[in-house]
């Protein structure tokens, strides 16, 4: 998968921070799952601020979604639940609907009922995750509330039988293009939703097949490289996945490894976003045109047990040590 181009990218003085951050952040993850006592790092920036896990699928939100996808259900409902969850990307919102409805399914979906419930929930607090902002799609559907437009979007996807079209797709990029054609799903969200659908049995593509650089990742890339040469942002991400073993060996650090699974394109994409955040605190002089100078979210220890379960097609679930299956107070999960 090596890219051969004449215009080679030029690394900046902050390039090594990408790999060093990845190793440190993954070390925290390993210490926590092995029930080691705090502190889990001597890096104050990582200790005091919120960063996602190195492997996207091991984050709390992704783990919650994967558990929904592998309930006993047909592919239509796998698609329905995935999109419903990801439009809000908040576990508490989905859990609220689960409590208030007899069931969550494509067959019983009622725009009026879901809209009523979420309007009620909105009066009590936020119903969206702060991880990223989803445009309202109000111009397409014309509802007053953002969540109403997103429910209308979900309804349109189901009416269009998008679950069949995605299941019949020949590549991750084809799924991405399908999602990108819908209101409020720009390049970043369409790609993120594509990866989420690919966790399920609806799709079965390699995470090394396709990647789209999000805004945060682009900021991180521009900090780690003085020049991209003739490379695109996506080429840079591919370069990092290709060079992960070599670069970690060069720096004398441990290569992050999820029970035998190396960093995939989506993980390296996310790592650029997290490196951008990390450098705001460790190297303020690295700030680029984004204008962001601080990390918004501080580290807060989460509560409750966490069971790890990954898509069975990855063949790593049987390698997870029994002591790692359920961990209490796993504050590393975002």
Image (cartoon, grey):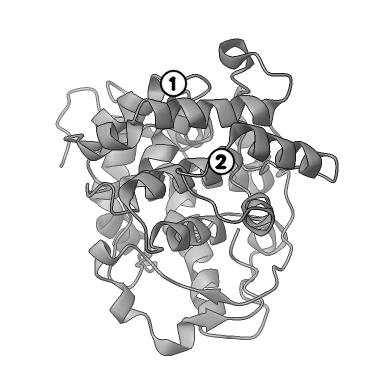
Q: Is residue 266 left or right of residue 133?
A: left
In the image, what residue occupies the spot 15% across and 42% down? 1
Residue furthest to the bottom: 323
Q: Secondary structure at mark 1?
A: loop
Q: Is residue 326 left or right of residue 281?
A: left
**Vertical side of 8 occupied by 197: above or below:** below
Q: Is residue 274 left or right of residue 46?
A: left
Q: Write down the quadrant of residue 232 in the picture.
A: top left
Circle 2 crowding by C-alpha within 10 Å: few under 14, some 14–19, many from 20: many
Query: Tag on residue 150?
Result: none
Nearest the eye: 54 or 281: 54
Nearest the eye: 272 or 137: 137
Asked if the residue under mark 2 is in contact with the one under mark 1, i.e. CB atoms within 8 Å, the reply is no
Write down the residue under mark 2: 276
Write down the residue under mark 1: 182
In the image, what residue occupies the spot 39% across and 34% down? 191
The picture places residue 103, in percent across and down from the top left corner, at 55, 55
**Vertical side of 261 occupied by 239: above or below:** above
Q: Would residue 294 be visible to someone looking at this image?
A: no
Nearest the eye: 73 or 265: 73
**Vertical side of 53 occupied by 33: above or below:** below
The picture places residue 283, in percent across and down from the top left corner, at 63, 43
Q: Secondary structure at mark 2?
A: helix
Circle 1 crowding by C-alpha within 10 Å: few under 14, some 14–19, many from 20: some
Nearest the eye: 258 or 256: 258
Q: CA distance from mark 1 to mark 2?
A: 29 Å
- In this rendering, the label closer to the viewer, 1 or 2: 1
**Vertical side of 208 occupied by 137: above or below:** above
In the image, what residue occupies the spot 26% across and 59% down? 245
Mark closer to the chain start, 1 or 2: 1
Q: Would residue 265 be visible to someone looking at this image?
A: yes
The picture places residue 239, in percent across and down from the top left corner, at 27, 41
């Amino acid at each position: 998968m090596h890219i051969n181009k004449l215009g080679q990218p030029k690394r900046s003085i902050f390039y090594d921070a990408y790999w060093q951050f990845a190793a440190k952040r993954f070390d925290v993850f390993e210490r926590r799952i092995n029930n080691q006592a705090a502190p889990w790092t001597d890096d104050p920036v990582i200790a005091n601020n919120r960063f996602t896990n190195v492997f996207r699928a091991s984050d709390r939100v992704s783990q919650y979604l994967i558990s929904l996808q592998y309930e006993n259900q047909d592919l239509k409902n796998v698609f329905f639940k995935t999109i419903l969850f990801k439009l809000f990307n908040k576990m508490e919102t989905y859990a609220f609907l689960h409590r208030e409805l007899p069931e969550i399914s494509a067959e019983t979906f009622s725009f009026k009922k879901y809209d009523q419930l979420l309007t009620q929930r909105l009066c009590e607090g936020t119903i969206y995750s702060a991880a990223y902002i989803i445009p309202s799609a109000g111009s397409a559907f014309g509802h007053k509330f953002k969540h109403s437009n997103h429910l209308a979007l979900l309804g349109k996807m189901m009416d269009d039988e998008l679950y069949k079209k995605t299941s019949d797709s020949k590549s991750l990029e084809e799924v991405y293009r399908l999602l990108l054609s819908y209101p409020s799903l720009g390049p970043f969200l369409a790609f993120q939703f594509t990866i989420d659908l690919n966790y399920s049995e609806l799709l079965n593509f390699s995470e090394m097949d396709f990647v789209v650089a999000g805004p945060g990742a682009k900021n991180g890339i521009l900090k780690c490289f003085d020049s991209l040469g003739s490379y695109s942002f996506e080429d840079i991400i591919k370069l990092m996945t290709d060079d992960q073993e070599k670069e970690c060996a060069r720096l004398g650090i441990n290569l992050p490894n999820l029970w035998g699974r190396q960093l995939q394109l989506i993980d390296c994409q996310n790592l650029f976003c997290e490196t951008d955040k990390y450098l705001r605190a460790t190297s303020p002089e690295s700030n680029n045109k984004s204008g962001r100078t601080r990390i918004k979210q501080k580290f807060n220890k989460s509560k409750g047990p966490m069971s790890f379960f990954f898509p069975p097609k990855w063949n790593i679930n049987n390698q997870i040590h029994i002591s790692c299956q359920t961990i209490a107070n796993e504050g590393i999960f975002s």
